[in-house]
Amino acid sequence: MLRIALASFSGTAIEFYDFFVYGTAAALVLGPLFFPSFSPVAGTLAAFATYAVGFVARPLGSLLFGHVGDRLGRRPVLITSLLMTGLATVLVGLLPTYAQIGIAAPLLLVALRFLQGLGLGGEWGGAVLLATEHAPARRRGLWASFPQTGPSVGFLLANGVMLVLSATLTDAQFRSWGWRIPFWAAGVLVAVGLLLRTSMEETPAFRELTAQQKTSRVPLVEVFRDHWRLVLLTAGGLSVGYAVFYMTTTWSLHHGTHDLGVSRTTMLACIMAAVAVKGVCTPLVAMLGDRYGRKPLCLVGTVVVLLWSFPLVALLQTGEPMLMIPGFVVAMLGFITMFAVLGAYLPELYEPRVRCTGASTAYNLGGVLGGALTPIIATELSRGSGTPWGVAAYLAAIACVSLLCFLALPETRPVLAPDHPDPVPVAA
């Protein structure tokens, strides 16, 4: 299980590194480089719009790779999605700017961002199912938290590289070529991920389905015919997690550096501190999910975000690191209280024959609902002087919707007798 968990963790870390490094670059430099004819605010909005393209592509990737995962197995998804996202990220780092090739630059940027999102849309489902379908029932939440820890590590890698570059290069050097280095580094990370994943075996659940000839012929049709309500409820529930995460890590980075005058290095350090706490707490919260259930933790996390929406914005507005850090930390703890258990919760909600398509689609559709437009909407709501309370109200409204969705979902934690042998869950 440890080898399997590390393989699933490494892939999500690498692919989310690719995804997050773009978000950080969009907040810091992509607007002037690829949309120079726009005003500073409009250029940032345009860069965030290309950022949103990746979220729109993620559900499409989940449908494409979900079909592959439910028809041909989880393993092909793990390898193909990693290659697609990694190559697209490296190419962004090689892309000429608007000053060099004109309108082709932003068009190519959008296309590569779309490919990033497409690959990431398949990654999460494959990685999580690799862990959950091998794990013993009693510890399924714990082992499924390994791929859920990957995004934290990917974020810290992406922003850590940006932080080092910001601290060691002049602003002119960073804007000229320094921002490209994190994108080039993706090539090395992908090579490492492929070495770990090519040796993985197919999951027991899929082998059992294949042996019994019960694989779905058209999993997408089955999901939307038989599970459409479940897809909408799970996506709606997840939307608040995406909203608070990208509000904290992407919009606040832009707002702090451009509107509040906080240095780029300081903002990156504050956000990274909060994400580091989130990463450390992920397996701990997942163990609570194994003990007390998935749904209760999702409800607690949503309520935390709801109650913290206004304090989060107020603490950010001070521009003081010692106040911003606790604001970000509590927001990330609310987020991870939900998302630490999702690696087990979503697969348990869907039957094995359509599990890859159903769980991946819900996870990534939630990203569209909560993450794609959040930086854009928050940037618009924070225009002008004064504390942007509209941003806090927006986050609180999403939390209310997610709370209703989680209340409508069932609990899935396996209830086993004390002497239960913890069989590998083939069909559970």
Image (spheres, rainbow, N blue to C red):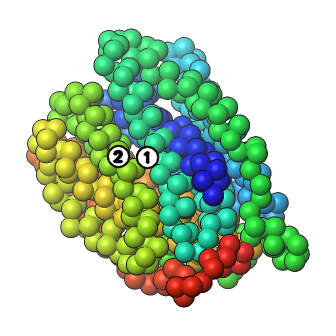
Q: Nearer the viewer, residue 354 or 423?
A: 423
Task: Find out whether the residues at labels 2 and 1 contact each other: C-beta distance under 8 Å.
Answer: yes
Q: Secondary structure at mark 2?
A: helix
Q: Name the image quarter holding residue 204.
A: bottom right
Please, what is the three-letter code of the amino acid marked with disc 1? Ser
Residue at point 70%, 38% (across, down): 194
- Mark toward the start of the polypeptide (2 vs 1): 1
Q: Is residue 388 visible?
A: no
> Disc 2 designates what residue?
275
Residue at point 67%, 64% (across, down): 134
Percent x, y for residue 223?
68, 75
Q: Nearer the viewer, residue 280 or 170?
A: 280
> Disc 1 designates what residue?
152
Please, what is the three-letter code of the amino acid marked with disc 2? Val
Q: Name the image quarter holding residue 272.
A: top left
Q: Nearer the viewer, residue 186 or 199?
A: 199
Query: Is residue 95 placed above or below 153 in the rendered structure?
Result: above
Relative to residue 209, is residue 184 drawn left or right? left
Q: Secondary structure at mark 1?
A: helix
Q: CA distance from mark 2 to mark 1?
A: 6 Å
Number of the label disc, if any, that sits on residue 99? none
